[in-house]
Amino acid sequence: MKKMNDKEFTERLWSNPRDNSAGFLQAAEQDSTRQQARLDALEFEHLLDNALRVPAPSPALEKRLLEIPESARPVELPLRIAAREETFLRRLLPVAAVLLVALGLGIYLQPESNSALAHDLFSHVYAETPYMNPNGSYTLDDVNSKMAAVLGVHLEVSPATEALQVSFVKDCFVASQIAMHLVLHGDLGDVNVMLLPEQVSTREFSISDEQFNGIVAPAEHGTLVVIGNKQEPIREYRNLLSSNLGWEY
Amino acid sequence: MTAKENNDNPVLEGAAGKRRRYEELVKNFYHDIFRYAYWLCKSRPLAEDLTQETFMRAWRAFDSLQSEAAAKAWLFTILRRENARLYEKFQPELDDIDEFESGLPDTHRVEPDQQMEMHLLYKAMQKLETEYREPLVLQVIGGLSGEEIASMLDLNNNTVMTRLFRARNKLRALLDMDYNPEGQ
């Protein structure tokens, strides 16, 4: 085993006084100076640990946390109650039928351009994904300089936008427009963000396919598209981005 | 349904198992998560909300947790993201020395000299640049390894260890302890 010199020992000691690896402990036992240095470091660490103590959480917090799975579970009607309410539910059937027809008509009457746009957007995501570098990392400055050059748009500098982890940023041809395509690290995978220079709709609408959900939202001078895996909270990304987008024209 | 039937049903057993694993996660880590949340927010109600939001997201994404060994770092990563998303914009400028002191559980057992040192150390921590403070808090409060912190902050391990070394040196200098920069 390579012998640890004093400089290396000191650096390791003060970068982690609680280092319990065999090599480090052996080096610490080498002489009395090192033994004393380690005691000093541990004493300092104890002080630091105490200085970082905070008030205890309220006793209710643990209970709140343990109840999360219960509150997140969809409500199921117990069978016994369901049977008793069968008559009542039967009376609701005509109303439900009318609602279903209305919903069906709504879907049928959705502008055909929306489904064509959705097709373009999803196709673009699938086509680009193999060429993306999952380890790519761009700072907010990088992102803004690229977006400003292509679309004259930027994200406001804030802790929230700076915390976004961007692995891909590039100008792309999407939906017959030169657009910006960003990929963010989401909780459940990549979140694709596209900024189109034209407003494709005056109203926000949702899109989805078998793998992704998406939101197409009008922005000040264009359109913001956010696409992520089914369980990804894409609405939160939409909120964050739309409230931080700045258009220069 | 009997317990045996329940165990025979892989779907129910899977759901129950997931719930049990989640409960263990809460019991094992919620104190550390709250402590780090408090350090970030400087407010108990905000820290509790942030802790709840963190575990809510953890539950929703529970299937993506690859191994229990990675759970703590995973929770801290979620917490940091949630804090950035929810609170960093609105973080009040608190200098909660009173609350800090009243929150020390062992204050009555700490000698006055040591209390003063802890107070000064706390103030010194506030003065540390973020690049030094952040890994140090993750190490001391979270008990996270250099590799885990490096992965979380998107740095390499050597950079993290150097920052931890410098962070402690800066704190010691700020405290004006009997310190020899050469280390020997």
Image (spheres, coloured by chain):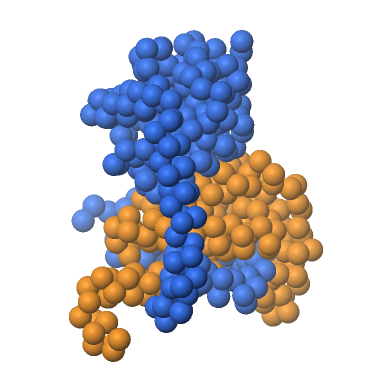
Residue found 61% across the figure and 60% down from its top: B49
**In this view of the protein, which residue sits in the foreground, A70 or A237?**
A70
B123 displayed left or right of A12: right
Residue A138 showing in the rendered view: no
Answer above or below: position of A175 versus B59: above
The mark total stands at 0
Residue A18's image quarter? Answer: bottom left
Residue found 75% across the figure and 51% down from its top: B94
- Determine the colour of chain B: orange
Residue found 32% across the figure and 71% down from its top: B15
Q: Residue A195 at what x, y percent from top left? A: 47, 22
Answer above or below: position of A201 versus A135: above
Residue B102's image quarter? Answer: bottom right
- Chain letter, colour blue: A
Residue A71 showing in the rendered view: yes
Q: Residue B93 at what x, y percent from top left? A: 75, 47
Residue found 48% across the figure and 19% down from its top: A200
Q: Quadrant of the N terminus of chain B?
A: bottom left
**In this view of the protein, which residue sits in the foreground, A213 or B58?**
A213
B50 displayed left or right of B11: right
A40 displayed left or right of A243: left
Q: Residue A242 at what x, y percent from top left? A: 57, 30
Q: Residue A198 at what x, y percent from top left? A: 50, 14
**In this view of the protein, which residue sits in the foreground, A247 or B130?**
A247
A133 displayed left or right of A46: left
Answer above or below: position of B174 versus B159: below
